[in-house]
Every structure is written in C-alpha cells, then in structure tokens.
Amino acid sequence: MILVWLILIPFLGGLLCWQAERWGEQAPRWIALATMLFVLVISVLLWLGGNFSLPGNGESQWLLEWRVDWIPRFGIEIHLALDGLSLILVALTGFLGALAVLCSWHEIAHRVGFFHLNLLFILGGVVGVFLALDLFLFFLFWEMMLVPMYFLIALWGHSGSPGQTRIRAATRFFIYTQASGLLMLVAILALVFVHYSNTGELSFSYDVLRGTDVPEPLAFWLMLGFFIAFAVKLPVVPFHGWLPDAHAQAPTAGSVDLAGILLKTAAYGMIRFALPLFPEQSAAFAPVAMTLGLVGIIYGAVLACGQQDIKRLIAYTSISHMGFVLIALYSGSELAIQGAIILMVAHAFSSAGLFILSGQLYERIHTRDMRTMGGLWSRIPVLPGFTLCFVAASLGMPATANFVGEFMVLFGTFPSAPVVVVIASVGLVLAAIYSLLLMQRVHYGPEYRPGPLKGPDAREYGMMLTLLVLTIAVGLYPQPLLDTTAAVAAPVAELFTDGADLAARAGEVN
Amino acid sequence: MMVTPVVLSFLFPLMGTLILAFSAGRLGPRASSVIGVGSVGLAALATLWAVMGHGGGTEGVTLWTWIAVGDFQPTIGLAVDGLALVMMSVITGVGFLIHLFAAWYMTGEAGITRFYAWMNLFVFSMMLLVLGDNLLLLFLGWEGVGLCSYGLIGYYYQGLDNARAAFKAFVVTRIGDVFLALGLFLIFMELGTLDIATVLARAPELWAEGSATANLAALLVLGGALGKSAQVPLHTWLPDAMAGPTPVSALIHAATMVTAGVYLIARLNGLFLLAPDVMLLVGVIGAVSLLLAAFAALAQTDIKRVLAYSTMSQIGYMFFALGVGAFDAAIFHLVTHAFFKALLFLSAGAVIISCHHEQDMGKLGGLWRKLPVAYGGFVVGGAALVALPLVSAGFFSKDEILWQAMAAERTGLLIAGLLGAVLTGIYTVRLILGTFHGEPGSDHARHPEPGTSVFTHHLPLVVLAVLSTFIGAWIYPGLGGLFPEAPGDTVETGHTLLQVLAMGAAIAGLALAGWLFLMRRSWLDNITDKGAGAGLWKLWHHAWGFDALFDRALVRPWQWSVRMLRFDFINLFMNLPALIARAFNAGLVRSQNGRTRSYAVVMVFGTTVILLALALAPGGGA
Amino acid sequence: MLTLESLISLLPLIIVATTAVVVMLSVAWQRHHAGTAMVSAGGLVLALLSVPLAAGALISPPLMTVDGLAIMGSVLVLLCALVTVALSHHYLTGYIGPREEFYLLLLCAVTGALGLVASDHLATLFISLELLSMPLYGMLAYSFRAERSLEAGIKYLVLSAAATAFLLFGMALIYARTGRMDLAGLAAGLAASPDAWTLAGAVLMVVGLGFKLSIVPFHLWTPDVYQGGPAPATIFLATVSKLAVFLVLLRLVMVAPIFDSEWLRTLFTLLALITMLGGNLLALFQPNLKRLLGYSSIAHFGYLLVAIVVGGQLAVEATGVYLITYLVTTLAAFGVVTQVSSPFGGEDAAGLHHYRGLFWRRPWLAAVMTVSFLSLAGIPLTAGFIGKFYVIALGVADARWWLVGGVVAGSAIGLFYYLRVMVTLYMPEPGMRRRDATEDWGSRVGGLTLIVVAVLILVIGVYPAPVIDWVVGFSGVL
Amino acid sequence: MNGIPMEHGLILASILFSLGLAGLMLRRSMLFVLMSLEVMLNSAALAFVVGATAWNQPDGQAMFLLVITLAAAEASVGLALMIQLYQRYRSLDLDAASRMRG
C-alpha cells in the first residue's frame, strides 16, 4: 500500500496547496515542501529497510508489489512495483521536488497555490512512471506528467524574447512528447494483441508480456515505437529540439524538475521496458542507438558552446550527457548500465545545481544573456564558488559523481565498442570546453557592470551545499547506489549477451 | 608504522583547503597565509617522518573500495615506495618553501584565501597522484592537478587573456588526459585490473614484447604524459601559463605538475619496457622538445617565459633519460631540477615584485647591486641549470643522463643533449645579463624596493640555493632497487670521456654567451634586425610557430563550426511537420468561404469523384 | 403486426411523443417557461425509466428492431436531450419572444432520434431521420433576429435537404435493384450479386448519412452551423443528431453485406483518413471557439469511422465506448460555452478572447473547460483517452496501420489547438470587456448538470470498467 | 412488366435528380433553390415508383407518399426561413447570408 501512498501524496499535496493559497502566500510553499520531504523520507526508509540482493529464482525481483484489477475487459490492472532502480529514482524525485519548491521560494510571486499544484502533479506523475509496471498504467502516467509541466512553462515561464515564444516552447514540448508517446501506445497495443493471438490471454502486465515472441518484421517496428518515445524524452539528437526552448522559458523549478527527473524517466523507460521487451531487436539496433548517442554527445557539445543564453547552454549540456547514457544502455555490459544509472543520478544533481544557480543569478541580475555577464566572481560572494564546483562536476572532474558514472560507462562499453568509446572520449574534451566556457563568460573576465550583489541567503546556501555534498559523496563512495541497482542491471546486461535463447532465459528470470 | 604519516601528509593540505574554501571571507590575509603555509609545512614534516620510518619495499594501505562492480574494483588505496617518497618529499619540501615565499609575494593582493585554497588543493591532488596505488586514483589526482592549475593560472581573472590562458592550459592537458583515459580502458580490458602492481606483474605474461596492444597501451600512456608534462605536441599551454602569479609557476610549472608525466612513465616502466619502439619515441620526443625549447628560450623577452621554455627543455632531458631506459637518472634530474628551477622562478618573482610587476628584460637591467639576494639566487640557479661542473647539482644529474644515453648507444640523442647543454648555457647567461647587468631600462628598474622580510623572502631563496649546489645532489637517495637496471650501470668504458664532453659543452656555452653578449652586443642586435636573422629570431620567439599552427588547424575550424551550428539545423527538419500543417490549414480554410452554394458544389464534386472511382474500380467494386 | 408486446418495446418513443403533445397543449393553454422545461424534463426522465421495460419486451414492432444497439442508443439520446434541456433553460431566460417552442422542437427531434436508432426498414430510417432533422432547422434558426442564427438555419436546411435527397435516391436505387426495403431482406437480396446500380445506391446512401456526420467532403456546413446556431441547439446537433445517425450507419454496415465489400471498405478508410486530418488541420488557428469545436467534432468522427472500417464485435463495443466519451466531452465543452453566453444576449460568447483568464474569475468553470479540452485531446485520466485508446486498439487489432497512423498524426495536430484554448484560460486577464457566466452559475440546474458531466469525464477516465461492461453487455446482443 | 424496362425509369430519375442538383448549385435566389430541392425529392420518389412497378409491390408507392409529405414540410419551413431572409436582407439572394467563414 505504501506504493499507492507514494503516488497519492504529491497529488493530494498539490490540491491542498491550491486551496491553501487563501491562507496566505507562504502556506502553499510550506505544504509543498512538507509533501516532497515526506515522499523523500518514505523512500529513504524503504531504502534502508529493503535488501537488494540478486533475487534467487522463485521469489520475485520486486521489493514491494501491489496489484488490483482495473479494467478486466483488457486485463489491465493497477500494478505497482518497486525495485532498486525505481526506489533510487523515486528518492531522487522527492529530493529534487523539495529543491524545486525551495528554489522558487521568492521567484514565484503570483498565483503561488496553482503553481505548487502543477509542480506537485508533475512529481506525482513521475513517481507514478517509476512505479507503474502495467504497460497501460505506465503509459497513463507517462502522458499525464506532461500536462502540469506544460502549464508550468506556459504560465510561469519567463521568456527573454516576445511573450509568444513561452507558449510556443511549452506547446512544442508537449506535442513532441505526446505524439511519440502515442507511437509507444500503438507499440504496446500491438504487443498485447500479438500476445493475445499467441496465448489467448489479454493482459497488459509487464511480466506476462516479456515472454511474447513477436514475428520478426513487426517486432522491429514495435521496438522502434518504444525507442522513439524514449528517444524524444531522453533527448536523442534528431528529436531534441524541444529541450533548449523548454529550459530557456521554464521557471527555475520547472527546469530543475525537467532536467533532473523528466529526462530520467526516458532512461528508466529504456532500462525497464524498451530493452527487456525486445531483446534481440534492441541488440540488433544497438549500433544505430550508439551512433545516435555519439552524435548527441558531439552535437550537444558543439551547440552548447555557441549559446548566448545560460539556461540553453545547460540544456545542451544535458543532451551531451544523456548521449553517454544512451551509449551505455545499448552497450550490453553490466558495468556500463550501472554507470548509466550513476550518471543519471549525477546529472540530476549537477544540472539541478546549475539551474538553481542560473535562477539565483536571474534573481540578482535579471538576465540570462551571458553577453551581459562577466567578472561576477568579485561581485557575488559565494555563488561563483559553487558554480565552479558544479561546472567541475559537469565536465566530469574525478571525485564527483559524473566522473564515476561517465568512466564506468566508458570502461564498460570499451570491450564491446572501442571505436564508440574513443569518439565519446572526444566528448570529454568538449565537456571541458563548454563547462569552462560557462565559467569564463559568467564569472571570469572584466566586470560588465560594477557594484556588489547580495550573497546567497541561508536557503540558497543550504540547497547548494546539500547538492554539492551529495555529488562528492556519490563521487567518492557510490557503493550504496551500486548495490541497490545491481539486481536491475545484471539481467538487462544478460539480454544482450546472446540473442538466441534470450526469450527462454528472460522467461524464467521473473 | 607507515600509515599515519602518509595519510597525514595528504590530509593536512586537504584540511587546509576545506578551512580556507569554506571560510567565505572571514579569514584575513595573515590568517589564510598562515593556514596555507602551515598545512603544507605539516605535510612536509609528515613526509619527513614517513621517509624516516620507511624501511624500503612498498607498503600499501586501502582506505575503502571506491567502486565494486563485477571485476572492476578500483580502491582508494595508497602505495608508498621509494619513488613515491621521493616525489612526496619534493612536493611538500619545495612546495612548503614556495608557499612561504608566496606569503611575501602575494602581500597586498586581493583574494589570498582563494589563492592558498587552490595551492593546498593542488598539493593534495599531487600527493594523491603520487600515492595512488591504482590507475583510477592516479587519474583522480591527475585531473585534480589540472583543475588546480586552471584555477591558479586564472588567478588574476579580471584580465581576459589570463582567463583564456587558464582555459587553454586546461583544455590542452585535458586532451592528454583523454589519451591516458583511453590507455586505462585498454589496460582494464586487456589485463582486467587497474591496480598498478598487478598491471606491472600481468603485462609481461599476457603481452609479448613489441606486440600491438603493448605498443598501443604505452603510446596512450605516453600521450597522457605529454599533455601534462608539456612536451612537443601538447606543449603550447606552458608559456601562456606564466599568466599566473610566479609562486604558482614555481610550484606547478617547474617543480611538481609538469613532472607528473615523468613520474607516470617511471611508475609504469614495466609497460614501456614491453614496447621498445615507444621507449625510443619517448627519447626522441624528449630530445626534440629539449632543442625546440632551448632555441625558443633564446628569443624571449619576458623572463618568466624564458624560464618556462627552460623548464620544458629540462623536462625534455628527463623524457630523454626515460627514453634510453635510465629511469633512476630521470628521477634524479627531476629532483635537482625542482630545486634549481624553483629557485630561479622565486628569484624572478622577487625581481618582478621589486620592480612593480615589470617582467620585460628590455625594461630591467642594472639590478645586481640593488637586489643582491635575487641576483645570488639567479646565479646559483643559473649555474645548476647550465650544470656547472662539480659545484652545481644540475651537473651530476644531467651528466648522469648523458652518460646513460652514451651507454645505451643512442648517439643521435646524445648529440642533441650536448647541443641542448650549449644552448642552455647561452640563454641562461643572456637571461642573467639582460636582467641584472647593463643599464636599467625603466624607472621601476632604477629604484626597485628589494624584499626585506627575512623569513618569507630570504629563507626560501637561501635554502633552495643551498639545495641547488652539489649538496642537493648528495641528498638524493637513489632508487636503484625500484627500477630495472639502466644501460649505464653495467658498462664502464667511456664514462670519463663523456664527463669531459659534458663539461666542455657547458663551459663552451658560457664562454660563447659571455663573449657574444658582453663584447659583440651591437653585432648581435643588427643580425636580429634584418633579413634572415630577424625571421629566425621571430620564429624562435613564437616557439617554432606551433601556436599559430594549432590555432589555424584546430581552434579556428572549431570556432567556425560553433558559429555555423549556433542555429540548430537538425532541429529545423523537426519543424517540417508544423510547416506542412500550417500550409494545409491555409489551403483548407479558404474552402470555408461561407457561401451555401459553394458548399453544395463541393458536396456534389465529392460524390461524383466517389461514383467515378466506383465505375472505374476493377470488377465493379465487388 | 402491432401487438401490445411490441408497443411496450416502443415505450420510450411513445412517452416522449406524448410529452411533446402535452407541451404543445400547455403552451396553448398557459405559457410558462419554467413549467414547460420541467414537463419536458419529466417526460424525458419517464422515458429513461421505461427503457428497461422496453428492453424486456421480446417482439419488436414491424419495420423496427429494439435490440442492444437500439437500447443503448435510446439511453444515450435521452441523456443528452436531458442535459440539453437543463442547459437551455438558463440560456433561454434572456430570450425575448416565445421560449417554450424550443422544448417542443427538441422533444420532436428526440422522438425522431429514438425512431432512427431502432429503425430496421428503409422507410422508418427515412421518416425518423427527417423527424430528427426538421425540428433541428427550427432550433438552429430559433433566434432568427440575430443574423447568424438565421444564416445557420438556412444553410443547414438547404444542405440537409439535398443530403436527404441523395439518401432517398440511394434507397430508391437499392430498392429498384432488390425489391426489398427491410434491412434483413436487403441483405438476402444483395448477397447474390452486387452490381453497379446497387453499389451506386449504397454510395449515395453513404453520402446522405456522411453529410449528417460531417465526413470531410461533406463537412463544409458544420463550422458555420455550429457558430451560428444558439448554444443549446448546437449541443443537440453535435450530440444527439450525430449519435443517432452514426448508430444507423453502423447498423447498415453490420447488417447489409453490401456495405462490407472490400471496395467500400477502402472508401471508408480513405474518408476516415481525410476526415481525421482535415478536421484537425482546419481548426489549427481558429479564433472562434464554437467553430473550433465544430472542426474538432469533424475530427472525432473521423476517428470513429475506424470502427466502421474494421466492423465486427470489437467495433460495436469500441463505437459504444467512444460515443459515450465523445458525448460526455462535447456536452461539457459546449455546456461551458452555453454557461458563458447565458442568459441569451443576442450573440453567443464564442470568441476565444472572451475566455482569456477565465480561471482567475471562475475557477471551477475553467476547471470544467480544461477537463473537457483535455478529454478532447485524449490526455490520460480523462474519458477522451479511453475513447482514443479503444480506437487505436481497434486499428491495431485489425492491423490497419494507415488508420492508426492517421489517428496518431491527427491527435498530434489536434493537441496544438486544444492546448492553445486551454492556456488562454489561465493567461493573466487583460483589461478589455469580457463576457462572463452569471455569478450563481454553479447553483442553477444547468450549472449542476455541467459539473456532474465534468465529474463523469474524470470518473470514466479514471475507472472506465463499469461503462465498458455496460457497453459490452449491449454489443453482445447484436 | 409491359413495355418500358426499369433502367429507363431509373435513368429518367437520375437525369431529373442531376437537373435538380444543377439548379441547387447555379441559382442564386433561395426560391429557386427550394424548387430545385423539390425536384430532387420528386425524382427520388419517381425512382421509388419505378421500382415498385418493376417489383409490383405497393411499398414503392407508400414510400412515394412519405416523400411527398416530407417535401411539403421541407418547403414550408424553407419558405418561412426565406421570409425571414427577405426581412433581414431585403433580397432573396442566398449569398447574402454568408457572413460566417474562415
């Protein structure tokens, strides 16, 4: 039952915030913060309590499971389950949700209640995505988390250029993800009906559908349907157009959520659904996916260097980082997949940090255009120091979580695809270039405009410190994370090793 | 036992950095310099204690396993052996003196806390690099050192070119780091471990000598070393790195960071022995950078850039030694070089501060009476640099390298080494004469304010001066046991001949320079003004045009592509469906013209089309 | 032969007809707007209660079949009519001139719809279709003093009459060729050899019905009539009229084999595709809300045509569920338009700028509109998603990849204008004049029904099982 | 069935039908539009009668009666609206009432 509460708490909290606006502007903020911390505390307790050893065959691989019939006609049921990977991502959602609430404490002034409603609905939807195991339920949450994010960007975003682009950016974000989501729905339905024709049993459950052997020509298209849906959200290069606009226009809280969690739902989706459901096709598709990952790394980096708007730059860096994750997922090595999971967590911390900092910069100098920034190191007391740390993290400085993630990915992928790793390592140099460019243009160089600005207050300092401590902690001691997700990464890696008897082995794993 | 001192030796700088970084302006300049210098001092003491307690062999201690996934198990573990101890003592010893001098150098500068935070972080990373028992931890130190050099070169961040120099330094070293990373991936794939000891043990079993993988691995490690030690292909960042404060140049670009590459190759000597032609390549690169830097140093006007190129050429000597297999000689030269190059840089720093940040030789001159300590430091340092026979430390170490080259029958390299020695003599004399003798070029130089404080100014210079003499050569404990026997150890013939040759080269260099600069100054000036001479002088001034080459070959195309791609092309074709929809919308909306009769016409048209299709359909639409 | 038993099966139709007569008499005796509304609502509720009775009766009257489809159709028709009555009461209070005749027309149209849904014979089909359409002309042109309503009425009359002529001519050709008028007989007659004339007849019938369902080549009247007609009339047109006609078309396709010949199936596929895409593309930059809803209903019936193409058991079930979700959503969307434009002030509040910043004045009304537009767009947790899910499931089950692609593309395009409308609700209000719903809209009957409908959208979206089981119950009987 | 084969009747009805359609599309005045609607309905009725005689069943004629009643109703409502059109626009031109577009 805890799983249901994990999803319901953000939704109820959101409604409460909306109504709490009547009691004053601070009430919704405290309620939202309390809700998200509640979710975080629950997930941490679950983490401490649960054992994540590799499941012996027989007992199920899920730490917690809860299923109840929903639409018997189609065999759809509300099937929630929690394992190492989803637990970490739920905890991450709780943590980043609390951060998002904190960082928009002063930024959002008008209609605070409704803002927090949207914010908490996004988080509720995301927690739903991480817990849902029934394909229909997964799709439902997948589409549902878009609506509040759309409103967040469209109504509270700040747009540099004329007002209209804010809504256009939000609409583009929505349509990109929704349309590709529909492709996934078509793939899910096709899978269900193929299973139905094979076994006469109509069901949307993940475990049941894993075993279906889909006739060859169709299977590739279904795998592609899943892949495109997750590729748009990851984002993978040809479909990345929406991310920079969405980030540039979104409020800080929106960007933190968007970069921190929404991108991870795509990677989670790939690990949970795209790979296990279509092992042979994914293995055959791996070279293409890896090339797309490489293009993502290089293209994202080159574009990041050319940006004027600070948030667009950070957005493109996310594209580059996610290129690594894509390579890892399709490399088929357990080390790489573990690395990808660590990289996801690390990227969440570092990009959230950078976005919060750009938000704080915006609060002080009311612009995101780097051409009007410079020499801020001496003007703002502590912020540049933190920016340097997060810039170091984003370029993969050892002792930060990004380094651990990226290098595990590269170590893991090297045996199976050395050329890919060599090109990806060029990405490391480019990462150094765009990260330091961010540092140069904003904090170093001559002062664009004189006059000291106020330093971070306790709230901002606390946020930055916790993020930094977490990044360094995971960077130096990632073992707890690795143990939790070991049970997830191993079977996914096995899928790739030999295409032949995959279905059989996949069948008896669960 | 060994653990506590070793762990303490790198914990102190870490504590220093944390205190300074999180003090957020509460510490004044005095307090922060005390903490900064103190922490490195304590580290030096801890190292001393470790050296005393060290009974030979390697003692390892593992703090915790960093990552454990399948057989990828890098640990945060320290391995202390003779090599590590030598390096530690250089880092903390020379480092402490430089920190001490920096207290004097940085008086009156803004942001001293930030300076010492970076310096301590640098010392901490360097200690990690040296102590790391597995390649991943070494890589951690390796990158940490790069980050600190970025921070310190870009210390005067208001100047855009300082920031750009720091950026260039980091990016070029990062390229080297990527080669090293690839080397690591290859080693892990082939040997299944990253632990240095096991790598050195397994490599000979799994790889045949001269096999492709051995060559590739050695080549990649060499690439990493070149980046960090500023050797020929990846050296363009070192001269620009002089934009940082002089103690930084002393610590990073003379004593410690640039020697990291030498340490790495020395540490992985087993790997290189398996790839003889890569060993030769190391020697050749050493020789080439040696000569290139020496020539470039001849044509510099800024005293720090002369010293920078001289560092590059001296490291070229170390690579030269590694190339011929004389690992011990290379480390010996590393140690002595740390002493006299730090001395030279600090003396230069003293001169610069005294003449109000004046670095151009043309504007200096006639200072030798006014800045006696600095002048003394320059002379002693210069002597060691030129390897003045018998009296200077440089003589013993450089002579050892040349001897090893001769013993290994690398005559080509030997000749390059000797020519380098002559050139070194020339540019050193030019540097000393230009800076201290002749007429003062500017009013700063006419009345400099010499550094007066004994503790922070005189003490470091004097101590380093003493170490630059033959005493420095005695202190070196000799790491014979650690490394495979060098070519020179077994062969004896020709040793004396070489010593004579080396001494002759050094003295010839000095004599030639003295004659040229004292007697023939006017003849020299007009040669460098016209035609071929001027062209040559300009070529050497710009270090054989490598900077321009890289700029045109790499930097400009990169900037062009960034500008071209600023507008997101791939994204354009994702807007296609939107444009098509917009076009269709415009077309269809025109059909809604509001007139009932035109609606009827469209309806009838639709029906007739369907009926026609029916009529034409094959088999009457059955 | 008309036995007592078969009369009982026609009970709902009879009750509604008697209510119409009662209303006529009450208007003649004493005009009382609220009273008339109460009587007609009462009559509809009575008819609704009698439906189980009618379902019980085994023999259906001649020329008609009261089977599962008919019962389901009747229930949906009656419910929509009830909601329309509730919404039109508040709307008509501002109307100067006779108000009671609106309910009279409405009741007659409902009788026609009930007859149409159960018709089994070409004659009853024709008569019921006309009984449904004629009152609609009156309802659309009800506020004829406003130019737009008159224009809407005229356009609908002229084009609908033309469509009826097509339908009739089609029927005539089929009759001439087979000599049978009842659908079962038709099926037997046509099984032999469908020659050119019969196929032409079938095509003309499809054109006639296609006009009423506003399938693309015959859709041009829809936006103008939706914009012109008074809000309650448009609600009725968008829900009851389309519902009844679609069920007849479905029955035709299911019963008469002529309609499932391969060629006609490809024709339907083509029509479905261009209707889906055409409807969505037309609505992209539409500033007028009622026209936009008109285009959206064109697109939605394009999706529904997939059921006609696929045919079979699952298709009937999909049609039932999709119609329920479509009706609930359209009632909510148009209901909000009615609330904002009632009481009647000459011109309906159709321009999108009227709804800018509605959320910050009328949060709950804007919430209803957001839910309805989310449902139109097919976003999960709303009824629309269940409908779209069914249609895509249908397309995938029958491996009709073109249609499935069309649905995906159509809904992607559709998102653009649905989102555009939704976001204007939450935009900060500019200062200019705006139409607004009355202060106490929530406490009036119309407001309450609207909220109930909106809650229904969410309930169906969250827990659709009961609705699906109810529909499966009926589709089985066919 | 004497003399005239059914196809001829149907063709006649089709011709009549297309004439009505042409009138609907070409004429501007609403009066003629209503008249052409009548023509179309009657042509359909004719087809029914032809069918009835071919199969000599009374259904066709019954259908004819229904069509006529419908045509009458249609005409009455059409004329009522035409009067309002005249009141409003002082002309019977159908295109006058075409303000809603786009």
Image: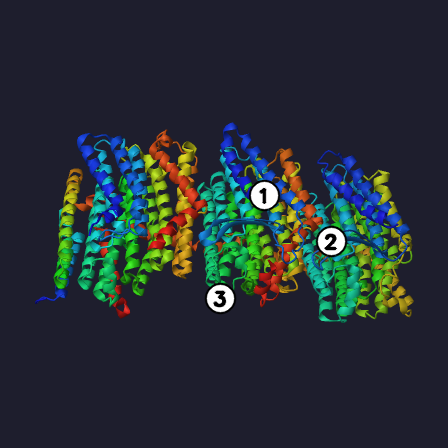
The tag earlier along the polypeptide, 1 or 3, is 1
Q: Is residue A6 left or right of residue B24?
A: left
Expressed as whole percent of the image width and height from the top left, the position of residue A501 reads 59, 67
**CA separation, marks 1 and 2?**
46 Å
**Observer able to see residue B608:** no
For label 1, the SS is helix
**Residue furthest toward the left?**
D3
Observer-nearest residue: B588 or B480? B588
Chain under disc 1: A
**Residue furthest toward the top?**
A23
The amino acid sitting under disc 1 is Ile
Residue D75, placed above or below residue C434: below
What residue is disc 2 on? B142
Q: Nearer the viewer, mark 2 or mark 3?
A: 3
Q: Which mark is residue A2?
A: 1
Q: Which mark is residue A215?
A: 3
The amino acid sitting under disc 2 is Trp
How crowded is the residue under tag 3: few (<14 C-alpha within 10 Å), some, or many (20+)?
few
Q: Which mark is residue C379?
A: none
Residue occupying image coordinates x 77% and y 37%: B32
The amino acid sitting under disc 3 is Pro
